Protein backbone atom coordinates (compact mmCIF):
# COMPACT_ATOMS: atom_id res chain seq x y z
CA UNK A 1 0.00 0.00 0.00
CA UNK A 2 3.06 2.24 -0.01
CA UNK A 3 2.86 5.18 -2.41
CA UNK A 4 -0.80 4.38 -3.18
CA UNK A 5 -1.48 7.89 -4.48
CA UNK A 6 1.60 7.70 -6.71
CA UNK A 7 0.44 4.34 -8.08
CA UNK A 8 -2.93 5.89 -8.86
CA UNK A 9 -1.11 8.81 -10.48
CA UNK A 10 0.85 6.39 -12.65
CA UNK A 11 -2.45 4.82 -13.74
CA UNK A 12 -3.86 8.26 -14.61
CA UNK A 13 -0.80 9.65 -16.37
CA UNK A 14 0.54 6.47 -17.97
CA UNK A 15 3.86 6.56 -16.07
CA UNK A 16 5.59 3.25 -15.36
CA UNK A 17 5.71 2.80 -11.58
CA UNK A 18 8.57 0.31 -11.76
CA UNK A 19 10.73 3.02 -13.35
CA UNK A 20 9.34 5.87 -11.25
CA UNK A 21 10.05 4.27 -7.87
CA UNK A 22 13.78 4.41 -8.58
CA UNK A 23 13.63 8.10 -9.49
CA UNK A 24 14.00 11.20 -7.36
CA UNK A 25 11.35 13.09 -5.41
CA UNK A 26 11.11 15.59 -8.27
CA UNK A 27 9.66 12.89 -10.54
CA UNK A 28 7.18 11.90 -7.78
CA UNK A 29 6.09 15.52 -7.46
CA UNK A 30 5.57 15.79 -11.21
CA UNK A 31 3.29 12.75 -11.17
CA UNK A 32 1.32 14.12 -8.24
CA UNK A 33 1.00 17.49 -9.94
CA UNK A 34 -0.25 15.98 -13.22
CA UNK A 35 -2.61 13.70 -11.33
CA UNK A 36 -4.15 16.59 -9.39
CA UNK A 37 -4.67 18.62 -12.57
CA UNK A 38 -6.17 15.65 -14.44
CA UNK A 39 -8.48 14.83 -11.53
CA UNK A 40 -9.91 18.35 -11.57
CA UNK A 41 -10.63 18.10 -15.29
CA UNK A 42 -12.02 14.54 -14.98
CA UNK A 43 -14.39 15.42 -12.13
CA UNK A 44 -15.65 18.41 -14.07
CA UNK A 45 -16.27 16.44 -17.26
CA UNK A 46 -17.82 13.53 -15.41
CA UNK A 47 -20.39 15.98 -14.07
CA UNK A 48 -20.90 17.48 -17.55
CA UNK A 49 -21.32 14.07 -19.19
CA UNK A 50 -23.69 12.88 -16.46
CA UNK A 51 -25.79 16.06 -16.65
CA UNK A 52 -25.96 16.06 -20.46
CA UNK A 53 -27.10 12.42 -20.55
CA UNK A 54 -29.73 13.04 -17.88
CA UNK A 55 -31.08 16.32 -19.25
CA UNK A 56 -31.01 15.81 -23.02
CA UNK A 57 -30.66 12.06 -23.64
CA UNK A 58 -33.17 11.15 -20.88
CA UNK A 59 -31.06 8.18 -19.78
CA UNK A 60 -31.53 6.28 -16.54
CA UNK A 61 -29.05 6.50 -13.65
CA UNK A 62 -26.79 3.68 -14.99
CA UNK A 63 -26.81 5.30 -18.43
CA UNK A 64 -25.90 8.70 -16.98
CA UNK A 65 -23.08 7.16 -14.95
CA UNK A 66 -21.81 5.41 -18.07
CA UNK A 67 -21.90 8.69 -20.01
CA UNK A 68 -19.94 10.42 -17.24
CA UNK A 69 -17.35 7.63 -17.17
CA UNK A 70 -17.03 7.75 -20.96
CA UNK A 71 -16.38 11.50 -20.85
CA UNK A 72 -13.79 10.95 -18.11
CA UNK A 73 -11.98 8.24 -20.10
CA UNK A 74 -11.84 10.49 -23.16
CA UNK A 75 -10.38 13.34 -21.10
CA UNK A 76 -7.73 11.05 -19.56
CA UNK A 77 -6.63 9.83 -22.99
CA UNK A 78 -6.45 13.40 -24.30
CA UNK A 79 -4.35 14.57 -21.34
CA UNK A 80 -1.98 11.63 -21.73
CA UNK A 81 -1.01 12.99 -25.15
CA UNK A 82 0.61 15.92 -23.32
CA UNK A 83 1.82 14.19 -20.15
CA UNK A 84 3.60 11.35 -21.95
CA UNK A 85 5.22 13.64 -24.52
CA UNK A 86 8.88 14.39 -23.89
CA UNK A 87 9.59 17.90 -25.14
CA UNK A 88 6.21 18.25 -26.93
CA UNK A 89 6.30 20.15 -30.21
CA UNK A 90 4.57 23.43 -30.92
CA UNK A 91 2.01 21.74 -33.18
CA UNK A 92 0.86 19.47 -30.34
CA UNK A 93 0.68 22.43 -27.93
CA UNK A 94 -1.36 24.49 -30.42
CA UNK A 95 -3.66 21.55 -31.09
CA UNK A 96 -4.23 20.98 -27.37
CA UNK A 97 -4.87 24.70 -26.85
CA UNK A 98 -7.50 24.75 -29.61
CA UNK A 99 -9.10 21.60 -28.21
CA UNK A 100 -9.16 23.17 -24.75
CA UNK A 101 -10.88 26.27 -26.15
CA UNK A 102 -13.59 24.18 -27.87
CA UNK A 103 -14.09 22.01 -24.79
CA UNK A 104 -14.38 25.10 -22.58
CA UNK A 105 -17.17 26.47 -24.79
CA UNK A 106 -19.02 23.13 -24.78
CA UNK A 107 -18.66 22.80 -21.02
CA UNK A 108 -19.77 26.38 -20.40
CA UNK A 109 -22.84 25.91 -22.63
CA UNK A 110 -23.96 22.76 -20.80
CA UNK A 111 -23.25 24.09 -17.31
CA UNK A 112 -24.87 27.47 -18.01
CA UNK A 113 -28.04 25.77 -19.21
CA UNK A 114 -28.25 24.25 -15.74
CA UNK A 115 -27.34 27.44 -13.88
CA UNK A 116 -29.70 29.55 -16.00
CA UNK A 117 -32.47 26.94 -15.88
CA UNK A 118 -35.07 29.28 -14.32
CA UNK A 119 -34.16 32.11 -16.69
CA UNK A 120 -34.31 29.73 -19.64
CA UNK A 121 -37.78 28.57 -18.57
CA UNK A 122 -38.97 32.19 -18.50
CA UNK A 123 -37.42 32.92 -21.90
CA UNK A 124 -38.79 29.65 -23.23
CA UNK A 125 -42.35 30.97 -22.81
CA UNK A 126 -41.85 33.71 -25.39
CA UNK A 127 -39.80 31.38 -27.61
CA UNK A 128 -42.53 28.73 -27.66
CA UNK A 129 -45.19 31.41 -28.14
CA UNK A 130 -43.36 32.62 -31.24
CA UNK A 131 -43.13 29.09 -32.66
CA UNK A 132 -46.83 28.53 -31.96
CA UNK A 133 -47.72 31.78 -33.72
CA UNK A 134 -45.92 30.51 -36.84
CA UNK A 135 -47.50 27.05 -36.77
CA UNK A 136 -51.00 27.99 -35.57
CA UNK A 137 -52.46 29.32 -38.88
CA UNK A 138 -51.64 26.16 -40.85
CA UNK A 139 -52.87 23.88 -38.05
CA UNK A 140 -56.09 25.89 -37.70
CA UNK A 141 -56.69 25.86 -41.45
CA UNK A 142 -56.16 22.10 -41.56
CA UNK A 143 -58.70 21.52 -38.76
CA UNK A 144 -61.23 23.83 -40.43
CA UNK A 145 -60.91 21.89 -43.68
CA UNK A 146 -61.46 18.60 -41.84
CA UNK A 147 -64.54 20.02 -40.09
CA UNK A 148 -65.91 21.32 -43.42
CA UNK A 149 -65.36 17.92 -45.03
CA UNK A 150 -67.19 16.21 -42.17
CA UNK A 151 -70.04 18.73 -42.46
CA UNK A 152 -70.43 17.98 -46.16
CA UNK A 153 -70.38 14.23 -45.60
CA UNK A 154 -72.88 14.45 -42.72
CA UNK A 155 -75.24 16.55 -44.88
CA UNK A 156 -75.08 13.95 -47.66
CA UNK A 157 -75.75 11.13 -45.21
CA UNK A 158 -78.68 13.01 -43.65
CA UNK A 159 -80.14 13.69 -47.10
CA UNK A 160 -79.79 9.99 -47.89
CA UNK A 161 -81.56 9.16 -44.61
CA UNK A 162 -84.40 11.60 -45.39
CA UNK A 163 -84.85 9.99 -48.81
CA UNK A 164 -85.10 6.58 -47.16
CA UNK A 165 -87.67 7.84 -44.65
CA UNK A 166 -89.72 9.48 -47.42
CA UNK A 167 -89.72 6.28 -49.45
CA UNK A 168 -90.61 4.20 -46.38
CA UNK A 169 -93.47 6.59 -45.56
CA UNK A 170 -94.87 6.23 -49.08
CA UNK A 171 -94.21 2.52 -49.36
CA UNK A 172 -94.10 0.96 -45.89
CA UNK A 173 -94.44 -2.49 -47.41
CA UNK A 174 -93.63 -4.16 -50.68
CA UNK A 175 -95.38 -7.09 -52.33
CA UNK A 176 -93.43 -10.25 -52.86
CA UNK A 177 -94.98 -12.50 -55.55
CA UNK A 178 -94.37 -16.25 -55.48
CA UNK A 179 -95.33 -18.62 -58.28
CA UNK A 180 -95.88 -22.36 -57.78
CA UNK A 181 -96.35 -24.83 -60.63
CA UNK A 182 -98.09 -28.20 -60.15
CA UNK A 183 -98.10 -30.88 -62.85
CA UNK A 184 -100.99 -33.32 -63.31
CA UNK A 185 -102.21 -35.74 -65.96
CA UNK A 186 -105.78 -35.55 -67.32
CA UNK A 187 -107.60 -38.05 -69.64
CA UNK A 188 -108.60 -36.84 -73.08
CA UNK A 189 -111.22 -38.71 -75.18
CA UNK A 190 -110.38 -38.93 -78.86
CA UNK A 191 -111.83 -40.83 -81.88
CA UNK A 192 -109.52 -42.74 -84.15
CA UNK A 193 -109.80 -42.93 -87.92
CA UNK A 194 -111.65 -46.21 -87.64
CA UNK A 195 -114.28 -44.61 -85.47
CA UNK A 196 -113.23 -46.10 -82.17
CA UNK A 197 -113.14 -44.05 -78.95
CA UNK A 198 -109.78 -43.92 -77.22
CA UNK A 199 -108.50 -42.26 -74.08
CA UNK A 200 -105.14 -40.49 -73.99
CA UNK A 201 -103.41 -38.78 -71.04
CA UNK A 202 -102.23 -35.21 -71.27
CA UNK A 203 -99.86 -33.39 -68.90
CA UNK A 204 -101.29 -30.13 -67.58
CA UNK A 205 -99.37 -27.52 -65.51
CA UNK A 206 -101.37 -25.73 -62.81
CA UNK A 207 -99.79 -22.35 -61.94
CA UNK A 208 -100.58 -20.79 -58.56
CA UNK A 209 -99.59 -17.14 -57.92
CA UNK A 210 -99.40 -15.88 -54.29
CA UNK A 211 -98.69 -12.31 -53.09
CA UNK A 212 -97.04 -11.68 -49.67
CA UNK A 213 -96.64 -8.19 -48.12
CA UNK A 214 -93.05 -7.49 -46.81
CA UNK A 215 -91.57 -4.51 -44.94
CA UNK A 216 -89.69 -1.99 -47.08
CA UNK A 217 -86.02 -3.20 -47.27
CA UNK A 218 -84.79 0.37 -46.78
CA UNK A 219 -85.94 0.17 -43.14
CA UNK A 220 -82.94 -2.10 -42.42
CA UNK A 221 -80.58 0.54 -43.87
CA UNK A 222 -81.62 3.22 -41.38
CA UNK A 223 -79.88 1.73 -38.31
CA UNK A 224 -76.32 1.48 -39.78
CA UNK A 225 -76.80 4.87 -41.45
CA UNK A 226 -77.75 6.42 -38.08
CA UNK A 227 -74.64 4.85 -36.51
CA UNK A 228 -72.45 6.30 -39.27
CA UNK A 229 -73.97 9.77 -38.87
CA UNK A 230 -73.54 9.58 -35.07
CA UNK A 231 -69.86 8.59 -35.39
CA UNK A 232 -69.21 11.41 -37.85
CA UNK A 233 -70.90 13.92 -35.53
CA UNK A 234 -68.63 12.74 -32.70
CA UNK A 235 -65.60 13.24 -34.95
CA UNK A 236 -66.84 16.72 -35.83
CA UNK A 237 -67.36 17.59 -32.14
CA UNK A 238 -63.84 16.31 -31.36
CA UNK A 239 -62.33 18.40 -34.17
CA UNK A 240 -64.23 21.48 -33.00
CA UNK A 241 -62.95 20.90 -29.46
CA UNK A 242 -59.39 20.56 -30.81
CA UNK A 243 -59.87 23.80 -32.74
CA UNK A 244 -61.07 25.52 -29.58
CA UNK A 245 -58.05 24.37 -27.52
CA UNK A 246 -55.46 24.18 -30.29
CA UNK A 247 -53.16 26.89 -28.92
CA UNK A 248 -52.74 25.41 -25.39
CA UNK A 249 -52.27 21.96 -26.95
CA UNK A 250 -49.56 23.24 -29.31
CA UNK A 251 -47.79 25.07 -26.49
CA UNK A 252 -47.82 21.91 -24.36
CA UNK A 253 -46.50 19.82 -27.26
CA UNK A 254 -43.75 22.32 -28.05
CA UNK A 255 -42.70 22.54 -24.42
CA UNK A 256 -42.51 18.75 -24.11
CA UNK A 257 -40.41 18.41 -27.29
CA UNK A 258 -37.93 21.22 -26.57
CA UNK A 259 -34.45 19.83 -27.26
CA UNK A 260 -30.82 20.81 -26.93
CA UNK A 261 -30.76 23.02 -30.03
CA UNK A 262 -33.92 24.83 -28.90
CA UNK A 263 -32.32 25.58 -25.56
CA UNK A 264 -29.19 26.80 -27.35
CA UNK A 265 -31.35 29.23 -29.31
CA UNK A 266 -33.06 30.35 -26.11
CA UNK A 267 -29.65 30.76 -24.45
CA UNK A 268 -28.51 32.92 -27.39
CA UNK A 269 -31.57 35.14 -27.01
CA UNK A 270 -30.98 35.35 -23.26
CA UNK A 271 -27.31 36.29 -23.64
CA UNK A 272 -28.00 38.85 -26.37
CA UNK A 273 -30.63 40.52 -24.19
CA UNK A 274 -28.57 40.69 -20.98
CA UNK A 275 -24.98 41.91 -20.64
CA UNK A 276 -24.86 40.45 -17.13
CA UNK A 277 -25.68 36.96 -18.42
CA UNK A 278 -23.19 37.39 -21.28
CA UNK A 279 -20.42 38.44 -18.90
CA UNK A 280 -21.16 35.55 -16.56
CA UNK A 281 -21.09 33.15 -19.51
CA UNK A 282 -17.66 34.46 -20.58
CA UNK A 283 -16.41 33.96 -17.02
CA UNK A 284 -17.45 30.32 -17.21
CA UNK A 285 -15.68 29.93 -20.56
CA UNK A 286 -12.48 31.34 -19.09
CA UNK A 287 -12.85 29.14 -16.01
CA UNK A 288 -13.21 26.00 -18.15
CA UNK A 289 -10.42 27.12 -20.47
CA UNK A 290 -7.91 27.61 -17.66
CA UNK A 291 -8.85 24.28 -16.08
CA UNK A 292 -8.45 22.55 -19.45
CA UNK A 293 -5.01 24.13 -19.83
CA UNK A 294 -3.81 23.12 -16.34
CA UNK A 295 -2.01 20.01 -17.54
CA UNK A 296 -0.65 21.81 -20.59
CA UNK A 297 0.76 24.69 -18.53
CA UNK A 298 2.16 22.24 -15.97
CA UNK A 299 3.95 20.36 -18.73
CA UNK A 300 5.26 23.52 -20.36
CA UNK A 301 6.52 24.80 -16.98
CA UNK A 302 8.53 21.63 -16.29
CA UNK A 303 12.14 21.51 -17.38
CA UNK A 304 12.07 17.75 -17.38
CA UNK A 305 12.85 15.25 -14.66
CA UNK A 306 14.95 12.16 -14.17
CA UNK A 307 12.01 9.89 -15.09
CA UNK A 308 12.01 11.28 -18.63
CA UNK A 309 15.80 11.02 -18.78
CA UNK A 310 15.61 7.37 -17.72
CA UNK A 311 13.04 6.71 -20.45
CA UNK A 312 15.23 8.44 -23.03
CA UNK A 313 18.29 6.53 -21.78
CA UNK A 314 16.47 3.20 -22.16
CA UNK A 315 15.37 4.21 -25.64
CA UNK A 316 18.93 5.15 -26.66
CA UNK A 317 20.31 1.87 -25.29
CA UNK A 318 17.71 -0.11 -27.21
CA UNK A 319 18.46 1.76 -30.42
CA UNK A 320 22.20 1.12 -30.00
CA UNK A 321 21.53 -2.58 -29.48
CA UNK A 322 19.40 -2.69 -32.61
CA UNK A 323 22.05 -0.82 -34.60
CA UNK A 324 24.76 -3.19 -33.37
CA UNK A 325 22.57 -6.19 -34.17
CA UNK A 326 21.97 -4.83 -37.66
CA UNK A 327 25.70 -4.35 -38.32
CA UNK A 328 26.40 -7.88 -37.09
CA UNK A 329 24.18 -9.39 -39.78
CA UNK A 330 25.53 -7.19 -42.59
Image (spheres, grey):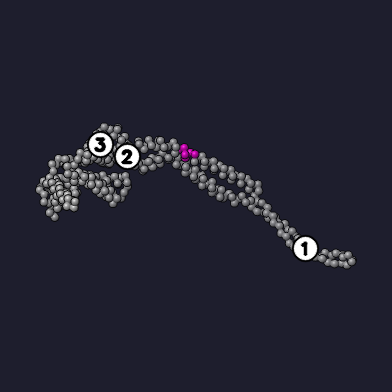
- Real-space Cα separation, disc 1 to disc 2, in angstroms: 100 Å
Q: Which mark is residue 203?
A: 1
Q: Which residues are magenta?
A: 140-145
Calculate the distance from the C-alpha at mark 3 to the C-alpha at mark 1: 114 Å
Q: Position of residue 59 (x, y in %)?
A: 31, 49
Distance of label 2 from label 3 (alpha carbons): 15 Å
For residue 228, which numbered disc appears in the image?
A: none
The reply to whether residue 34 is in sight is yes
Q: Is residue 122 visible?
A: no
Q: Residue at the spot x=18%, y=46% of the render?
A: 84
The front one of 108 and 70 is 70
Residue 281 marker: 3
Mark 1–mark 2 CB contact (< 8 Å): no
Report which residue position mark 2 lands on.
263
Residue found at the far left of this picture: 24
Q: Position of residue 184 (x, y in %)?
A: 76, 64
CB within 8 Å, label 2 to label 3:
no
Percent position of residue 30, x then y: 14, 45
Quadrant placement of the N terminus: bottom left
Amino acid sequence: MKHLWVRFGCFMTGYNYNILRNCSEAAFKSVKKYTAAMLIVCILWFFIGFTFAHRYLSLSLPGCLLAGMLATIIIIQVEKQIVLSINPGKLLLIFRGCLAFMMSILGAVIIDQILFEKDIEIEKISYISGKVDRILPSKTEELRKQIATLDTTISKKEQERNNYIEDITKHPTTTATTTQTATRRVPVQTVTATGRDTTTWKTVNDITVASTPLPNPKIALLSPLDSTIGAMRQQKAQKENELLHIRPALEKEMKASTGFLDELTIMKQLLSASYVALGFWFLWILFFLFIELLVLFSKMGDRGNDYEKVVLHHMNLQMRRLDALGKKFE
